[in-house]
Image: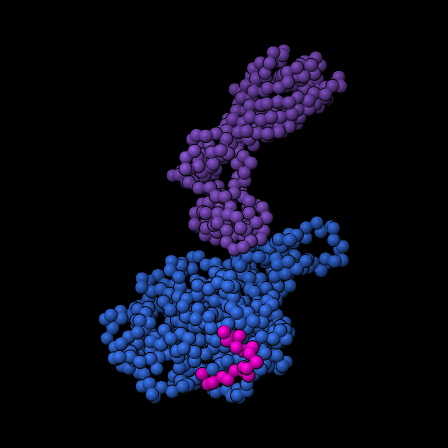
Amino acid sequence: MGNLPKAEAFKFPLDLGAPEGSLEGKARPVDNGSDVLDPSRYYSREFMQKEWQTLWPRVWLLAAVTADIREPGDYTLFQHGHEEFLVVRQDDGSIKAFYNACPHRGNRVCQVDRGTADSFTCPFHSWQFGCDGKLQKIVDEETFNPKLIAHRPGLTEVRTDTLGGLVFVNMDGKAPPLKEWMGLPEGYIEAYGLETMNLVRHTRSEWSSNWKTGVDTFYETYHLPHIHPQTQGSIEEFCQIDLYKNGFSRMIMWFGIKSHRHEVSHERDLDEGAKIFLRDAGIDPETYTGTVADTRRDIQIAKRERAQRLGLKEWDKLTDGQLSDGWITGMFPNVQMGMHAEGVFIMRFVPHPTDPEKFIYDNVLLYRHLEEPNYNVPTWMAMPKDVDVTGATRPDIERWPADQEPAIGPVLLQDFELVPNVQRGLKSRGFKGPLWGEQEQRIRHFHKEVDRYINGEN
Amino acid sequence: MGALAAVTRLRIAKLSELPPDTNRVFKLGGTSVLLCRTEAGVFAVENRCTHQLASLEGGRMRGRHLFCPKHGARFDMGTGATAGTLAKTPIKTYRVHIDADDNITIDWPQSSSPHSDGVTDMTQVQTSKQIVTRFLELFSSGAVDETMAMMTDDATWWVAGTMPISGTYDKAAFAKLLSGVLDTCTGPIRITPRTFIAEGDRVALEAESFTQTRNGRNYNNLYHFVFVVRDGKIAIVKEYLDTMHANAILCSA
């Protein structure tokens, strides 16, 4: 039953052999050259300013998930650097987004993370706006020169669009339509049915590096055996890498199977991590008869059987690979989504409002709840105990002060500790620029696209 | 002092008066209480947001949570706890009970309660006050027939003191007295209520009157009234007043 090649035959890059043009199929190679880029992009204020001139306003930014704004009047805030947007579900079911700045004096009109409302009142002088952003009331209006307010100043709207349960905004209003701009194959996001999932965890921590240093860290698996050695018995770091248009990319990571370089004493020598993946799939590792080479396939079979038993139609659209593997998906410029059958792990690398050497790591876990004993959020997603995952309560954002370790689980914490060290070295006189290998080709693909914006080509 | 704060049960409303997914303000003494109903239950909170002290009435609700309609501060209606950074102080909450007859009662701190035992029917108290208020409006309009129509057939009106007009009147006798007094005045006797204290069917209030007599004198008395209300009408009135002033102005007119 073992379908793994022997370690010596295990060559990078992987091609899982799915049909070309399918969602799983290997994308055609892209030649991004072998330039060594100037590392000042990671720390200079000039580069940060350029990003605010030619990158951020021109792209679609992931602003929200529809799970957070299901009913008319539901709203959520989206912060990006110094900008902030109020995203509101309208009475007709559509979604509008506004700059969260009062046209009167600039104050942040909405100052709570999310909620539901009939209108918005600025806390400063109680100017009131509808959910459609239109001005409803100016307090003591007769004390204003009528010419000053003749245009009935409302909240400034920003262009918005949705795709597969994700809400995006485009500041300059000139980006191509979202569907065109989205570099992923058609139906890629939709296959997972994000709109039927609930947001079960939201963490937000401040990390001490440029936002791109953060993206780079999460865009490759090359560092797994070194920074996350505990994953060697349950995650294969060699992966299929696919570069898509417009800076998008994907890597398919095998979960629930040992790394090709992980040594075992015998073929049934299951790592504790692999046992966890088996257990999550409903297989008892104590009575499991397979070998270390069989776990991924057996997890697929067990999950497929369970989905059929539970009538879980959403999984019909997913390949066996999607049941076991993580499709780690890079959405240009600053989002990575771990796509899994049970849920989706969204990380946003949000630029700091003022400091190019800090970013906000915003982490959202979407999960499809099933009323089924022994079915829960996969263990590796590191959910705290006793958190409601039924969707009845939307958890608040968990935040930590900048100097405090965030409770984001042991693996992400290893990245949290890694990143400031990388950031420091990037600034060294002795560092000449990153030397990216083929396992890191997603990073180069991403930076090439950043440069197209910075150079005014996009 | 015991460990537990002494509370009184106050009956606020019938469940039927509070449709699902609505909230409604009830005035209890000087406190505004918001009664809230969602699929998570019935909750009672002080109707004052701790952020900028706005009324929470009409705020949207989700499960146990209430959103201030002004700025969106969110409160747990069961515990009063806040979420987020906007409001830092919890709102006051009151434990809610619903009996087999769908009466909603809340635990009210005893120190701020009008009395100390049993269940006070807040709906009845509100109603009694409204009836007395309406009655005094009619009285102040000078429309004797309409005023009398709001008194029960067996109503009595007692006037304090030893004036010629002091004593207990039945309805017909009081109508006659009132008409006689009004004949000596240039307009109706306007009675302005000042403060109410109510308990069940009894309403006590301080009030002030004003009128002018045909011989050009001002009648401006101060009162303490006790009303007993029955079936939406006034059954008993006890009128305490400055009898010297009344005697001097009205009985010598």
How did the renderer colour the structure? by chain
Left or right placement of residue B195 versus residue B79 in this view: right
Q: What number of labels is visible?
A: 0
- Range drawn in magenta: A421-439
Q: Which chain is purple?
A: B
Q: Position of residue B141 (x, y in %)?
A: 66, 27
The stretch drawn in magenta includes residue B42: no
For residue B142, what is the image quadrant?
top right
The stretch drawn in magenta includes residue A429: yes
In the rendered image, the vertical position of residue B38 relative to residue A55, given as above or below: above
Left or right placement of residue A238 versus residue A424 in this view: left
Q: Position of residue B10 (x, y in %)?
A: 46, 35
In the rendered image, the vertical position of residue A452 relative to residue B121, given as above or below: below
Q: Colour of chain A?
A: blue
For residue A268, what is the image quadrant?
bottom left
* Residue B206 visible, this orientation: yes
Q: Position of residue B115 (x, y in %)?
A: 48, 29
* Residue A278 visible, this orientation: no
Q: State which quarter of the image contains the C terminus of chain B.
A: top right
**Residue visible at 36% across and 86% down?**
A10
Q: State which quarter of the image contains the N terminus of chain B.
A: top left
In the rendered image, the vertical position of residue B234 relative to residue A219, given as above or below: above
Left or right placement of residue A339 versus residue A32 in this view: left
Q: Position of residue A264 (x, y in %)?
A: 29, 79
**Residue visible at 43% across and 50% down?**
B40
**Residue visible at 58% across and 82% down?**
A38
**Residue visible at 43% across and 78% down?**
A223
Q: Name the foreground residue: A232 vs B212.
A: A232
